[in-house]
Amino acid sequence: MTGKTSPAQTPQDGWVVHKFGGSSVADAECIARVAGIIESTPVPRVAVVLSACKGVTDGLLGLVTLAEARSPDAGIRLAALEARHVDLAHSLLSPAGSAPYIELLKADCRDIAGILQAVSLLRSAAQNIRDLVAGYGEIWSTRLFATLLRERAKSATPVQWVDAREAVVVEWGPLGPAVQWPESEAAIGRLVPADFSGTLVITGFIAADKRGIQTTLGRNGSDFSASIFGALLGAREIVIWTDVDGVLSADPRRVPDAKVIDSLSYSEAMELAYFGAKVIHPQTMAPAVAREIPILIKNTFAADRPGTLICARPTSALKVKGITTIDAVALVNLEGAGMIGVPGTAQRLFGALQEAGISVILISQGSSEHSICCAVPDAEAAAAYEVVRRAFDLELREAQIQRIEVSRDCAILAVVGDGMAGSHGVAAKVFGTLADAAVNVRAIAQGASERNISVVIEARHSTRALRAVHAGFYLSPHTVSIGLIGPGLVGGALLGQLATQFERLRDTVHLDLRVRGILRSGEMLLADGEIDPRDWRAAPGAQRTSADLAAFARHVHAEHLPHAVIIDCSASAEVASHYHEWLAAGIHVVTPNKKANSGPLAYYESLKDARRAAGTHYLYEATVGAGLPVIQTLRDLRETGDEVRSVEGIFSGTLAYLFNVYDGSEPFSSIVRTAKQKGYTEPDPRDDLSGTDVARKLIILCREVGLKLEMADVVVESLVPPELAACGAEEFMARLPEFDARMQARYAEATAAGQVLRYVGRLDVRNRTATVGLVRLERKHAFANIALTDNVVRFETLRYCDNPLIVQGPGAGPEVTAGGVFGDLLRLCAYLGANI
């Protein structure tokens, strides 16, 4: 580039060049959207570079291939392309505007038909013929768009169509098309007056050589066109419109949490493009880079989003801008003591590969010079091995080179960012996250600029590595993947509570809680991102599939997220039987389900062992007392050195209600029936009256204080008459009045002694006994004066001996139980380092 200002350029021009790709002009609706974007641009001088409509360039090139094969389909396909553009003209233009457009279109198609006839006769098409046919797509799209803008213009703003073949002169060489800047600057000066103010509509992709023969700019040619015209016009900005929100920090198909990068330097963009990220090609940026013209990547279908700015001096605070991979790589390793201190070894290695036309993607060598390795495309691995073996045949025979190894099925992971230079801990985080994800690094490369750290890994670990490293740099370290089992009364209430607090927790303590799976009877919902707890039943975007606990756990334990927890709000023994494997696999467990902790002692102890071995957490505060801090209080007493002597309490809200209300004036069976109607009991009240639930809670507390008791060791008094133990629920309710006299007699005895009846669980630590049953208490006892459904727990300890410690409050109900589970979840996050 000469660096001179063309006749069309002055410092006051303020040109903004917009380029729209094929997906942006795919159909009439898309083209109209693009027109709206251009009309809303608040600058007087706008240049619009368009690609062909989506699929048209490939379709035109396909015609040439069909003609070479003398296929009759060539004519049919050409007619279909013509009809597609005729339909676009009728949809977008007035009759007066569409008629001349269609006339030119048909003339072009006749010319193409003549070219195809010649190709068919020759059975071969030279490259210039392919270039000529392929370029018609941009001619058709831009003619249409220029006419549309003129018809839609609400003012006298001029619209000029520019045929890039008359403005851009290139010569093809080994590195692709090279712009002939003096000729191109002179041409644009002739085409665009220096005082022009309005909109230029420019064909992308096509150009001409010095002889005036049409050529193309190759793949990504329209991006190159935008950069060339930005330089020729002295633009202040180039906007590349595509179908994504900007340049992403990783491939969103493999990393669901990929973020739009706010800004990149030209060097960062080139590094990412080289390693396969969806950024404009480095060569296409060259004219803009030379003039330091900012390039903005935006989404045609979401024009209000900020996009990504590529410029000389970005202001982004991100140290790492992107993480990307190249798959299908092989690692070639040359190793031998004879290489040490011998100059020219690397030159021979890479020279041999270069002569064979094998591209070297990455180079790594240790300072000992004992070995040198490089990465090549996997498809060329066998050829690379033979090339290197021949180049070092003598050294191999003389044992100066010990071995040549080729490792297939590898991938390269690259971490890119200007901010990495001079920053401590970036490499440590890369290798630390890879180690945590159990990804082995085969080779490492980093340039002196410190802009790129590249590692070679096994291809099968590529996605896991990409997700892990991306999470390490882009996600909050307190991001938690949540799987909820049992979205019933308690689980549903928990989802509601989470919905009200998510935003506050993210904003105030950077705690990122993501509900990614919900499992209920027969069905589970799985989301790569997260399920909105406010709309979990609809769960738009989530996958619905048959319930499978193993698959559910695998999904929740996502490789790319730092932490995973399963919250079990069911009452299922089957679900509880999986806690051990989840804890051992690194999944935390939070639950109000009592089945695991009150089941066989051996299983309970195995949970503690699994938790310790894996470094996971198992929290179950809500198994006793719902949201009351019963278990935590007990732990605090023991961990601070207090001696717990006894624990007793009313652990059932249902039984608390029954004996608070029962005063002898109404039969006990009637009280039970009323409680059932109000929803205070289980559907079968015997589940409450049997005392089993209280016994489960008591055995959980027994084990918390270190007593190794089984459920069979708890002495339980059931309030279910033995005669009604085996009948159905309806029969039980119908016959319960037959036994009211028994309860009436016990009530009368207690009243006569000035006492009350309460259903109490008692744990005597010193005597290692646990009992559950109906007892008589003095009226001044703490358990005698509680609210209707309260739970109350009394701790007698060495410290709290004269005045025992009492915890009291609502011990049942979906909201308070969900609150206890939520509290455990936040406690878990605090253990994981969140500043709550």
Image (cartoon, rainbow, N blue to C red):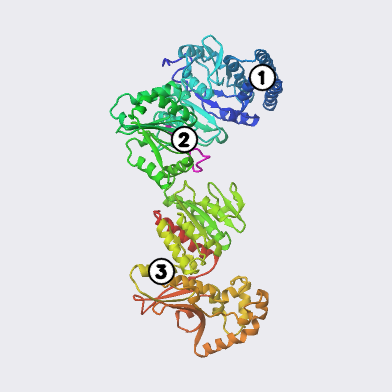
Residue 336 at what x, y percent from top left?
33, 32
Residue 204 at what x, y percent from top left?
55, 21
Q: Residue under label 1, please give it.
A: 69
Q: Which mark is residue 633?
A: 3
Q: Secondary structure at mark 3?
A: helix
- From the image, give the main secondary structure of the stretch colored magenta: loop
Q: Residue under label 2, please give it.
A: 408
* Mark in the foreground, 2 or 1: 2
Q: CA distance from mark 1 to mark 3?
A: 84 Å
465 or 537: nearer the eye? 465
Vertical relation: 381 (above or below) 119: below
Left or right side of 82 for 562: left
Vertical relation: 339 (above or below) 423: above
What is the residue that sits farthest to the top in this orientation? 211
Residue 334 at what x, y percent from top left?
37, 31
Vertical relation: 643 (above or below) 156: below
**How many marks are shown on the rendered structure?**
3
Vertical relation: 387 (above or below) 497: above
> Can the viewer see residue 282 in this picture?
yes
Q: Secondary structure at mark 1?
A: loop
- Bin the neighbour count of mark 1 within 10 Å (Cα to Cα): few under 14, some 14-19, many 20 and up: some
- In the image, which residues are magenta? 247-264
Residue drawn at point x = 53 percent, y = 72 percent: 693
- Bin the neighbour count of mark 2 within 10 Å (Cα to Cα): few under 14, some 14-19, many 20 and up: many
